[in-house]
Amino acid sequence: MFRFTTGDKAELYGAILHAFGAANERLETSLGLDEVRARLRTVGWLDAIHDDDLQEALRRLKEWQLLDVVQNHAENYRTAEEYERRNLQYSLTRRGEAAFAGVEHALSVLASTGALQTAVLEAITDRLDELYVLLGEPVSSDRRVFTTLQELEGHLEALLANTKAFNGELQRLLRAEGADLATFREVKAATVAYLQEFLVNLDQRGQAVAFAVERVEQRGVSLLHARALRGAELPPAAGSDPVPAWLERRRARWEGLRAWFRPVDGTRPRVEQLHDVARRAIVTLLQVLDRITESRRRSSSAVQDFRKLACWFAAAPTENDLHRLWSAAFGLGSARHAHLSHQDPELVPSSDTWAEALPVEVSALLRTSGRTERFTRTGKVRDVGGIKAARAERARKERAELETAWDVLGTDGPVRVSALGMLDHAVFERLLDLLGRALAARPDGTGARRAVTADGRVEIVLRLLPDGGRAVLRTSRGRLEGPDYLVEVRRPGGPRSSVEREAG
């Protein structure tokens, strides 16, 4: 739809659509080739254009479904040339009207500035009061109800658009970088004064609108929309019925009005949120001004300091001056290990150079903390005998509980899970662990599933029952019901059961 806005001939395409839009404002729905050329001059296109180029541009717009071409059969033509130039009539399609309206709206948004207007709130209240009076009078005109409702929706849309635009401009002002301090101070002062004036009696105006909405709803919103529909006098349409879509738009806009001033769910009205946004904006503007002022107070920055230091290094006359400048700028002295000496200094002649002298051991602590090692009395070692004894006792207790559980679960041969009946909860947890291990293993050639515990001390053999069945295990904390199995719990290497011997 907006393909005409790009390319080498985008300006020509835009001028042609602008010419058709200007013609529509004068109720001229179709234009011929000569009329298009004349309209191009009225919209500001002064460049010379050949007929072939103009026809090619019109053809491209037709390919993009922005223009429609029809033949004018009602005209009388005297010559073939006249027929060729005046026969084809061009007009905007619905897509063309939408594309032109979209571009116009985009340009108007770029050129417009948002505003917080208290007069709009008062106008909304007046229109609601007028609707309340009109709904109370059955003899009132439905057309008047429709026009009043249209004015109310227009004021609401203006409030929403101006509020969003002003909030966007305000946020861009807060994020502005490199602004002149004097200019920003003037803009800040004017904006703060503007916000303060808007906040005066904002609560009372919002409550007045909410009260007016409640009064209209007492008369009936459905009655309002029904009378406005009769006053709208919608034209008949060849396709679908436009009434449901029209009523749906009216209901959606009324819900938007309620959300701003009197929400149905009892939440906070958006007009109060606008109050908070304005107050936060005032505080933020003052904070931004303080930060800008504070940054301007610094005589120089770190970058400027390093650049100045580089100039000094470049201008130093000798190498000794460079070393003195380095020491003064960064405060770095000689190596910290230069004072260390050999364990027996007499073995190293004083005439030897640093490269020829024997190496000196340097502590790693000197590199990390700047201090040499200090040998002091060894710290006391904490007596952990009590902790070890307590841990050993706890381990023996857990092992005894585990042995008790294995003794309880140990079977002389295969038994049904349902035969276990009532179990202690600790034994029940061990049994669940064994059953889980067995069910996770693959069955062997006999169909049995085998698994052992982590320490390898207990083995479980699990088999399916031919008749199936259900098993119920009970503990002090509840009951567990599941499929019944034939289970055998024993020590690995112990005697095989009779079932295993028969299978062997």
Image (cartoon, rainbow, N blue to C red):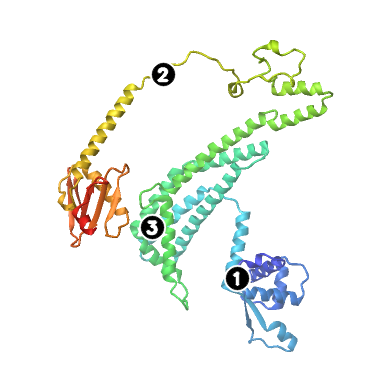
Q: Which residue is mark 1?
A: 96
Local packing at callout 1 (Cα closer than 10 Å; few below 14, some 14-19, many 20+) is: many
Q: Position of residue 38 (x, y in %)?
A: 72, 73
**Vertical order, 93 against 263 (above or below):** below
Q: Secondary structure at mark 1?
A: helix
Residue under the point 65% across and 73% down: 61
Q: Which residue is mark 2?
A: 381
Circle nearer the viewer, 3 or 1:
1
Instruction: State the mark number for residue 387.
Output: none
For label 3, count other residues whose C-alpha is less than 10 Å away and answer few (under 14), some (14-19) or many (20+): many
Please state if 360 lies on the left or on the right of 282 as rendered: right
Residue 198, position as x, y percentages in the image: 51, 43
Q: Residue at x 25, y 32 (%)?
A: 397
Q: Where is 398 relative to 68, above or below?
A: above
Comes first in the chain, label 3 or label 2: 3
Rounded to the nearest angstrom, the CA distance separating label 3 from label 2 is 90 Å
Q: Quadrant of residue 82?
A: bottom right
Q: Is residue 265 visible?
A: yes
